[in-house]
Structures are given as structure tokens and as C-alpha cells.
Amino acid sequence: MSDQIFLYIALGIYFAGMLAIGYFAARRTKDHEDYMLGGRRLPPWAAALSAGASDMSGWLVMGLPGAIYATGLIEAWIAVGLTIGAYLNWLIVAPRLRAYTLVSNNSITVPSFFENRLKDRTRLLRIVSALIILVFFTLYVSSGMVAGGVFFESTFDADYILGMVIVTAVTLAYTLFGGFLGASLTDVAQGLLMMTALILVPVVALANVGGLGAVGDSIASVQPDALSLTGGAGLTGTTMIAIISALAWGLGYFGQPHIIVRFMALSSVEGAKPARRIGMSWMILSMAGAVISGLIGIAFFDRAGIALDNPETVVLRMSQILLHPLIAGFVLAAVLAAIMSTLSSQLVVCSSALVEDLYRVARRTPPSQRTLVILGRSCVLVIAVIAALLAITPNDTILGLVGFAWAGFGASFGPLILLSLLWRRLTTWGALAGMVVGAVIVFTWGKLETGVYELLPGFVGSLIVAVVVSLATYRANADIEREFTDTAALTLARRDA
């Protein structure tokens, strides 16, 4: 049996497993809240692993190892920033958001939470935030499709468009019918597969190269600056800007709808604590595996005398060379898992923005649950088609596409999520001004060519504007005060229970 057949068998098993999980979830999706939020029944382990898997995308298995392989450990500051940000997100945001969304009119989307939390009668806050979700997530979804096309192109020498279509079609199949629960349960399986691959590949590659000493010697001779956390340049102004920009990625966690919606779906407030422990353990192991894979890849391909055309395929190529074809096939499936887990989660959030936050706002009479579910599935399909059209001719790397969308959400929503949960005096106009300023800075900052990641100025600008405008427009509201107090009491009681 040829190696290629083994690869196809592994991918076939993976695809069949994802579709089976999607079918299981579809049988348990009865109404609109089930489709959008899984009925708020997500256990801690599922919330933790699905949040991690939907967060990382193809960036974890392709983008990060590729960046380390090409540039060295200076790129690892991104992993450090993300780890810190994820921990704080689980610690601060998760329990309080789970409680607040329930207290504040059972909000099931981020835009509806903003509206209910701030008692916005104009509905502008909900509409603008839904539009921001659609803009940035369409780009984010497109990055996942690009990763799928690159995967098939580099692995099977297949047509880029064909690969993109296959990945999109399978993801659509289980997301379209399984909704949020389907996306979350497939994320669990995909997250475990990703972590296993990122541990297995560097361990086998390390043994093949001859141990840590041999790896260090090879890197020192081929790319001596790769082991420097400053890129070999010392703490110059340019280096400091690069490190601060990388660490700033962690700020993005507070505003990512596809991640924080997992907090809203937790089965209980107290479930945030075990979920945090599980999620952070998965993240640290996976991140470490990705960074180490990139470094070992430098030594491995140098000793093998192989030129790697695309650094983002370093994990894929090592697995194909070192492992039995069937095992390599499952490693390749892990790459697809990274791509598809994020893709499915983002499609569900886009659908919720269209249906829950735009259609229901525009319609005066409440639609039936059946109509809402059908519309939700239709919107998943529409967003997928638009993102696919954008992905046909990609004009950026996977990391570049992800970085821009990550910054957009982090700057637009991150400060508002924190202020909504921790500050009583946030107002509708403050939130709206902060949201718009954050989005505008992200879109325009790159033209200045400062070298600073646009998330950092976007986040700071959004935070300052939201606070200043809120102080200028604040009016006491008894309902807001009561809900804020009730949420604080509920969070504290459940945490100490």
C-alpha cells in the first residue's frame, strides 16, 4: 500500500469522525438558543478545550512554528503574550460574563449583552457591534480557508482551490446542522488531536537529529540568532517595539467573540475554575510544542539537506518524513483540526450576528424558533461563500490575516467587555465611541508603518475614549446598578461555593 493511501485513510477517518459528531449535535439542537449557545449546557472540559481549539486555528500548527523556523525565538513573545492574556481572560472575564449574561436578560450574543447591559434603547450599540463582527470575522474565516488551501497544496501537491473547497465543505456540513454544540464538540476532539501532534512531532524529530546538543549546534551554525529572544540585536528600540507588539497579542483575548461565547455557554459560573485549569494546561503544552517544533525544524532540515520553500509547512513536512504514513496522516488531520475548529466557531458567531443582532432587531414581530434556526443555517452558508471568494487569491500570510482580525476584535470589543464587567459607569455612548475608535485605529494604523502591532494603540485608544465619553454622559440607572450588584454577588457566591 502506498504512503499516499495511508494519508487518505487517516484523513477519511478524521472527516468521518467530525461529521458523526456534527450529526450527534444536530439531534440535540432543538431551538435557536441551542443552535447559537448550546442551551448553556457546556461542561467545563468542553468549554476549555473548545475555547482553546477555536482560538488557535491554523496559526498554532502552521503560523507559529513557521514564524519560529523563519525568524527564531523573538517570535515566541507572541506565545508568551497569548498565554498571559488567556489566563487573565479565564480568571477575570469567564465567571463574571457567565453570570452577567444570564442576569441581564439572558443575553446569548456579545452584541445583545452590550445592549442589555447598558440598557441601550437606540439599538445602535447592538447593530454596530454586529457589523464589526461580520467585517472582521469574514476576514478571519477567509484566513482559515487560505490555510486549508495551503495545506492541501503543500501536502498532496493538490490544487489550492480544491483543498480550500474540501476543508470548507466538511466544516460547513457539521456546522450547518450541529450549530454551536457541533462546533464545540468537534473542537474538543480537534484540540486533543492538535496537542498530541505538537508533542509527538518534535519528540520524534529531536530523537532523529540526535538530541538537544545536536539541535543547538545545528541552529548555531545555520541561524545563530534563532535562539535569542531579542533576535540577536540586543534590546534596541526596534527590538523593544517588536517584543511589546508581540506581547500585545494577549490583549486581544478579552474581545474575541468566538472565545468568550464559550464562557457564556458554560453550564455554571463555578465551572469557570476547572475550565481555566484544563484550558491553560492544554494551551501551555500546545504552545510549547509549536515553538519547539519550529526550532527543531531548523536543525532537522539543515541536517537532511532539504530546502523548505514555505516555513509554515515545517510541522507537516517533518511528520511526513519521520512518521509512518498512517500516523503522519493523523498529524496532517491535526493541522486540518486547527483550521476547521476555528472556522466552525467563527461561522456560528457570524450567523448569530446576522440573525440575533440584525434580523431580530429589524423585525417587529418575533419570528418562530424554526424560522430562526433555518435563518441561522442560511447565514452560515452565506458567510462561508463570501469568505471563500476572498480566499481565492490571498494577499497575505496566514499569520498576517489572523493578526489583523485578532487586532480588530481585541481593540473594538476588549476594552468594552472589561469595562462592562468591572465598571458601573460605562454608558452606551462611551461604549459606542470606544468601539468605533478601536476599529478605526486598527484599519488605519498600518499605514503609519511604526512597527507597533495595531492592537496595542487600538486597545488603548478605545479604552481611553470609552472612559472619557462615559464620564461625560453618565446618568444613574437603577436597573443597571441592580444588575451590576447582582452579578457581583452571584459571581462571588458561586466562586466560593
Image (cartoon, grey):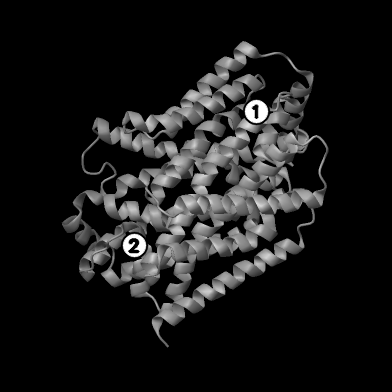
Which quadrant of the view contains residue 467? top right
Q: Earlier in the sequence, mark 2 or mark 1?
A: 1
Q: Using the image as rendered, state which of residue 79 and residue 164 is in the foreground.
A: 164
**Residue at the image point whose x is 21% and y is 39% from the top:** 233
Check disc 2: other Cα within 10 Å, few if <14, some if 14-19, many if 20+. Answer: many
Q: Using the image as rendered, state which of residue 285 and residue 64 is in the foreground.
A: 64
Name the spot of residue 311 as percent of width and height, x first: 31, 58
Quarter of the image where the N terminus is located? bottom left
**Residue at the image point whose x is 67% and y is 37% from the top:** 97
Name the spot of residue 218 as percent of width and height, x first: 20, 61
**Residue at the image point whose x is 19% and y is 52% from the top:** 224
Residue 464 visible within the image? yes
Q: Using the image as rendered, state which of residue 108 and residue 394 is in the foreground.
A: 394
Q: SS for tag 1?
A: helix
Q: Residue furthest top?
A: 472
Q: Which mark is residue 125?
A: 1
Q: How many marks?
A: 2
Check disc 1: other Cα within 10 Å, few if <14, some if 14-19, many if 20+. Answer: many
Residue 122 drawn above or below residue 90: above
The residue at which mark 2 appears reads as 314
* Amino acid type, label 2: Val
Quarter of the image where the C terminus is located? top right
* Amino acid type, label 1: Leu
Q: Could you tell whether 46 is left or right of 141 in the image?
A: right
Name the spot of residue 387 as percent of width and height, x first: 52, 50
**Residue at the image point whose x is 76% and y is 33% from the top:** 104
Mark toward the viewer: 2 or 1: 1
Q: SS for tag 2?
A: helix
Q: Could you tell whether 410 is left or right of 160 in the image?
A: right
Residue 285 visible within the image? no
